[in-house]
Amino acid sequence: MIFSKIKEAFSGKIASIFKSNSQDIDEAIDQIEETLILADVGITTSTEVCDNLRKKLKKEDNITEEIVNNLLKQELISILNKQEYLDDEDVDKKVILVVGVNGVGKTTSIAKLSNIYKNMGKKVMLVAGDTFRAGAREQLQIWSEVAGVECICGADNADPASVIFDGSKQFIEKDYDVLICDTAGRLHNKKNLMDEIEKIKRTIDKNIETCSKEVLMVIDATTGQNAVEQAKAFYDKTSVDGIILTKLDSTAKGGVVFSIINELSIPIKYIGIGEKIEDIRKFEPKEFVEGII
Ligand SMILES: Nc1nc2c(ncn2[C@@H]2O[C@H](COP(=O)(O)OP(=O)(O)OP(=O)(O)O)[C@@H](O)[C@H]2O)c(=O)[nH]1
Ligand SMILES: [Mg+2]
């Protein structure tokens, strides 16, 4: 079961809350709200979910645990369905810029994406835009060999925008289908680094005109509510199109998904569920909620 860890944090508790409070439904809902907040769903979203839950339960005569569970699931699914989830891998040409803070799983996710596109029969090129961290280029190169795709690297400490510029040129000249750009991890509150990512985005926009472009932000699901701040900051600089939420196989509670979608209106595109190249899935709202409650 993919979400077994998240399920532990969420569902057992809801059942026990309901049992111990079966006389007082308001108190049970208050405790459900608390559980949602503890699972990183965030205060605004947890309150919204529980207000709706309370209204719906008022209409029920005989409230059972099953009814509460089903209504809670419906509320959570409807939050996730506020976003549209597009099946847009099968475009002719595409450039993907991958951004995020340090160590969240950007490079690993790029390997996973390159594998998805390669398996669709696309000609994939990776660009090692992380010229900052020692070993970053080699890490991407190794993954490119695992996936069997091309990898373009720049010189040590080269300006990342210039490496990505070179990658963009080769992508066009050699008629590749998919270009995926790695970038160095950066803290969302470091202005110079955030300006740099804006410049990288501009370089791509200026040099590649006629194809679909996407900024994917990688978020480590173990980060909790701080992930919302990160996403806001990256969105301001690069207008993030979608999120890859990694490490959902670990101790992540995963609730931050709801805040990101509800409060920032950014869709989650993929989830990372392990360290291997095939450990990536499309984000499916219903499956996600069924998996945790
Ligand atoms: N369990 C688990 N580990 C993951 C997942 N995705 C990435 N990792 C691990 O997280 C660690 C960091 O991954 P990287 O891909 O190097 O992260 P990064 O964002 O590129 O890191 P920097 O370039 O240093 O900012 C590695 O040990 C990965 O194996 C995932 O979905 N699940
Ligand atoms: Mg990296």
Image (tube, rainbow, N blue to C red):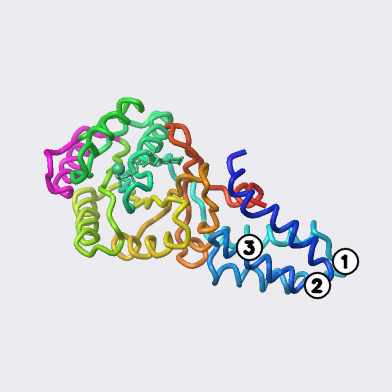
Range covered by the magenta-colored residues: 153-176
> Residue 224 or 173: which is nearer the viewer?
224
Q: Residue at x 28, y 43 (%)?
A: 182
- As shown in the figure, which amino acid type bears the numbered disc 1? Asn
User: Which residue lies under the disc numbered 3?
Assistant: 35
Please tell me whether mark 1 sits on a helix, a strand or a loop.
loop
Residue count near mark 2 (Cα–Cα under 10 Å), binned few <14, some 14–19, many ≥20: few
Q: Which of the numbered marks, if any, corresponds to residue 24? A: 2
Is 135 left or right of 84, judged from the image as shown? Answer: left
Q: Residue furthest right?
A: 62
Please tell me whether mark 3 sits on a helix, a strand or a loop.
helix
* Number of numbered discs overlaid on the protein picture: 3
Q: Which of the numbered marks, if any, corresponds to residue 62? A: 1
> Residue 201 or 292: which is nearer the viewer?
292
Q: Residue at x 24, y 50 (%)?
A: 209
**Marks 2 and 1, how far apart at CA:** 13 Å
Please tell me whether mark 2 sits on a helix, a strand or a loop.
loop
Residue 199 position within the rendered picture, expressed as x and y whole percent measured from the top left: 19, 57
Q: Which is in the foreground here, disc 2 or disc 1? A: 2
